Image (spheres, helix red, strand yellow):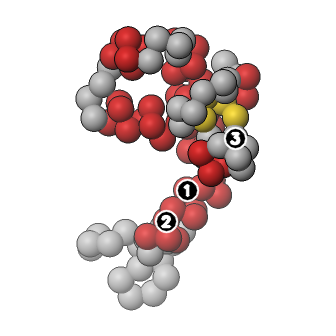
Amino acid sequence: MDWRERITSDADTLSGRPRIKGTRIGVVFILDRLADGWSAADILDGYPHLKQEDLQAVFAFVRDYLKDETFIMHAALKSGNDRRGDSGAGGGIAGAR
């Protein structure tokens, strides 16, 4: 699936956060519902204008975003866990011995 057919982002809606086209439902909103225990069926029942393909597009978008090594490195650097190798005493994964 090409998520670009169903996921969009523009500065005028949701402060530029990615969302499902034709809605104000953000990718993060869908992920939050799933993290809270909602099933795909629950989401589709609660938001009948959404389609299964919209949820698939959300998952494909997140998959592609997480595959981006710059994202992974940015997250590691932001948290202070630079895992590129030993950076001196105590380097590497925190707590590893």
Say which quadrant the C terminus sits in.
bottom left
Distance Cα–Cα, label 2 vs label 1 = 6 Å
Residue assigned mark 3:
9
Distance Cα–Cα, label 3 vs label 1 = 21 Å
Q: Do the residues under discs 2 and 1 have CB atoms within 8 angstroms? A: yes
Which label sits in the foreground, 3 or 2? 3
Q: Quadrant of residue 67?
A: top right
Circle count = 3
Q: Secondary structure at mark 3?
A: loop
- Up-down: is 70 above or below 13? below
- Up-down: is 78 above or below 30? below
Residue assigned mark 2:
76
Residue under the point 38% across and 17% down: 46
Q: Looking at the picture, how far across and down is residue 77, in whole percent?
A: 52, 71
Residue under the point 69% across and 41% down: 9
Say which quadrant the N terminus sits in.
top right
Is residue 78 at all visible to an observer of this figure? Answer: yes
Q: Secondary structure at mark 1?
A: helix
Q: Looking at the picture, how far across and down is residue 5, in whole percent?
A: 73, 22
Residue assigned mark 1:
72
Q: Quadrant of residue 60?
A: top right
